[in-house]
Image (spheres, rainbow, N blue to C red):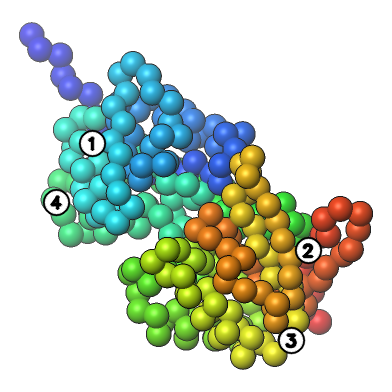
Amino acid sequence: MTAAVSAGWLAIAGLGPGDEALVTPEASAALAAASDVIGYIPYVRRVAPRAGLTRHESDNRVELDRARHALSLAAGGARVVVVSSGDPGVFAMAAAVFEAIEAGEPSWRGLDVRVLPGITAMLAASARAGAPLGHDFCAINLSDNLKPAALIERRLRLAAEADFAIALYNPRSVARPDGLDQALAVLRAACVDSRPVLFARAVATPAESLRVVPLPEARGEMADMRTLVIVGSSRTRLIERPGAPWLYTPRSAA
């Protein structure tokens, strides 16, 4: 008699910003139980190879294909972890998996699918600098791969007019060398002040660097795709001290 095949499952896990100490125990447990790990090449390579684990690497622009592959494996009985950096629900793979489920095989809706949260780049960067996200804030992805540039500009302007602190993801790349300069120009026009801007590069890795400059002095060349940029609100403060300053936004808006 043939043993029944165990039911597959799919976990979508965040690996945090870089330091292995920032990977949650929940994500580590899922990876330890997985038969397959799927994700963008550098994220998959953060998962150590071991017997019984198959690692599936893919390019950054095939998110829906990656999600369908993961769902198909899970439907066949595999124990699948789709990995993202940071948190999988923030500009990452969780949304792609649910989009694939909505448009895909009806049977996928009955799968055991779990989203395992992680520490985002903006939270890690904020913690390193102090507490610049201490009051109302928003996050905007500057990549125009999946949305028009005009929508990015509108959201930046409205966020500045509402006086949010703003975390900027994917600020600058080889394909978009002028994207951050354009965003900063929109913010300078809307804010008309010298609020602090944090450039946090490769946070929680050996290459980490933090730099704070006034908005009028912020330039696109200060960032790359490993940089998270936080633009403070009008109330964000800088505390000078020996070494790096502390950056925080007071809880009160009074």
Q: Secondary structure at mark 1?
A: helix
Write down the quadrant of residue 35 in the picture.
Answer: top left
Cα distance, mark 4 to mark 3? 53 Å
From this viewpoint, which residue is outermost toward the left? 1
**Coordinates of residue 152 in the picture (x, y in percent):** 45, 79
Quadrant for the C terminus, please: bottom right
Q: Amino acid at mark 2?
A: Leu
In the image, which is nearer the foreground, mark 4 or mark 3? 3
In the image, which is nearer the foreground, mark 3 or mark 1? 3
10 Å neighbourhood of mark 4: few (<14), some, or many (≥20)? few
**Coordinates of residue 165 in the picture (x, y in percent):** 65, 73
Q: Amino acid at mark 4?
A: Pro
The reply to whether callout 2 and callout 4 are in contact (CB within 8 Å) is no
Cα distance, mark 2 to mark 4? 49 Å
In the image, which is nearer the foreground, mark 2 or mark 4? 2
Q: Secondary structure at mark 2?
A: strand
* Nearer-N-terminus badge (1/4): 1
**Coordinates of residue 41 in the picture (x, y in percent):** 36, 42
* Nearer-N-terminus badge (4/3): 4
Relative side of 33 to 141, left or right: left
The reply to whether callout 3 and callout 1 are in contact (CB within 8 Å) is no
Residue occupied by mark 1? 74
Cα distance, mark 1 to mark 4? 14 Å
Q: Which residue occupies 54% across, 32% down?
A: 25
Residue occupied by mark 2? 247
**Number of the label disc, if any, that sits on residue 193:** 3
* Nearer-N-terminus badge (3/1): 1
Q: Which residue occupies 23% across, 36% down?
A: 74
10 Å neighbourhood of mark 1: few (<14), some, or many (≥20)? many
